[in-house]
Amino acid sequence: MMRLAKLRQRLQLTRILLDPRVTVRPLQILRELRRRGVQRVPDGLLGGARARPPRRDVIRFVQRWLDGERLTRHRGQWVLNSFIPPFPGPGYLRMFENLLSGRHLSPVSAFLALTAACGYRCPHCSAVRPPGEGLSTAAWQSAIGQLKELGASIIGLTGGEPTLRPDLEALVSCAAGAGCATILFSSGEGLANDPGLAARLRRAGLWGCCISLDAADASAHDRQRGHAGAFEAACAAVRLSRRTGFYTMAASLATRDFVERREFERVYALARRLGCDEYRLVEPMPCGRLAGAACGDLLTPEQTAGLRRFHVETNRRGRLPKVCAFNQVESPEVFGCGAGTQHLYIDAAGNVCPCDFTPLAFGNVQREPLAAIWRRMNVAMGNNPRRHCFIQRYHHLLRPHLQHGLPLPPNLSETICRQAAPEPLPDYFAMVMQGREP
């Protein structure tokens, strides 16, 4: 089965590299970068820019890079995973066009906490409930417009529970209209209680929907969510998402107990029965309601390695749903941590942070342009992706300041970043900057 899956993936890659909608504009950009003397991609890939069809060494390079991933088709586009925009499409092309923009850095993705309100009370929630009523429709639309100008390709709408926003359709329409792959992250309750909402969001341009599943057992899931009926609502929302035509994901927080019991295998089986396209796994982060968590609450290196193996081995078998474990995609050997350099998060009060797990604010979109905040955050976070998750490695630096409330204000955030040690680039970006193949 694994051999057939590899053969299928190679055929898919060949088909992709021969598709002018996928390759023509990126190759034009790569040739222009070469003409300008800008080294932003590996030499092997630049070599491919001079030849059509792509050379065999370029195909081998892409094959090695994608080993352990699962390419699929969704509504006429290719999807690697929810970290990368579907292609061909405007979000995909924007990642390449950003290289010619002259900007310092451009975010690949941005997550927006449209509200801190939620009917559940999960002990692991990373969201912080800010004072006040949150941002208006116009303020969020302005932020989305600024994200387009910065070159964002993916916009995730989260919370709290984003389906509690009465203007959700308008905000989805704004994000999708900006050419971004737009993803809804939800407990599923709002979709289950209003079956017509999914169709309205589809018309507004929503691309993907991710529903939280904490356990394969209803009582365990409901207990974790603190809400009877949460499991049935989540499953109903997944089915509705599939019927509506969204790229459908289930997501779990992989706690120590969750991993020790191998509950991720049972939830994966449930996601498979429900027809999900992707199963996302994120490990506990010392933020939100876990801000004071001890190291014993985080995964051990052995548990992290086990989830990474599950990601790679499941995808190599070619089964669906594909697995997207954060600690594999964001590992030192792949892309590392892009918080504040490849990704940003705006909380329900408008504070701009490196990610939804790193409660360091560098400004507020209601008070200054997002571009200025983004540049300030880039510089503070080191200008490049890190090999390791920032908040997991440096959460001890935040603890003396928790009395100030989260997220920490910009002056403290910049101080903490200065205290964090610089790190070498993750392997992928090191390869890009050095112009060598792995």
Image (spheres, rainbow, N blue to C red):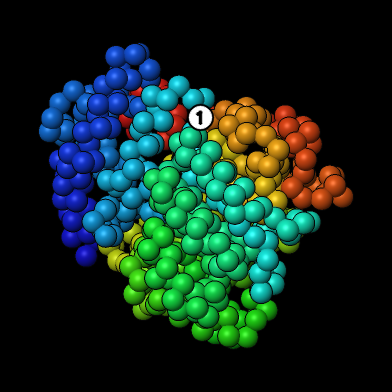
Residue 98 visible in the current orientation: yes
Residue at (50% x, 58% y) in the render: 170
Q: Disc 1 marks which residue?
A: 105
Q: Is residue 56 left or right of residue 417?
A: left
Lateral position of residue 406 relative to residue 319, left or right: right
Give the side of residue 205 with respect to residue 254, left or right: left
Q: Residues within 10 Å of mark 1 (few under 14, many from 20)?
A: many
As drawn, which residue projects farthest toward the left?
A: 53
Q: Mark 1: which secondary structure? A: loop
Camera-nearest residue between 290 and 127: 127
Q: Quadrant of residue 200?
A: bottom left
Q: Nearer the viewer, residue 333 or 183?
A: 183
Vertical comparison of 231 with 69: above or below: below
Residue sitting at 70 percent across and 51 percent down?
349
Q: Position of residue 221 (x, y in %)?
A: 58, 79
For badge 1, the amino acid type reads: Leu
What residue appears at the point 38 percent right and 17 percent down from the top-left corner?
38
In the image, residue 110 lies at what x, y percent?
A: 53, 46
Q: Position of residue 281 (x, y in %)?
A: 50, 61
Up-down: is 319 above or below 233? above
The residue sitting at 18% across, 60% down in the picture is 4
* Numbered marks: total: 1
Q: Quadrant of the N terminus?
A: bottom left
Nearer to us in this view, 246 or 163: 163
Using the rendered view, name the quadrant where residue 209 is placed: bottom left
Q: Can residue 305 be seen in the rendering of this structure?
A: no
- In this rendering, is residue 110 above or below 34? below
Name the spot of residue 437 as percent of width and height, x first: 32, 29
Query: If the image is split into quadrants, where does the C terminus sit?
Result: top left
Q: Residue furthest front?
A: 138
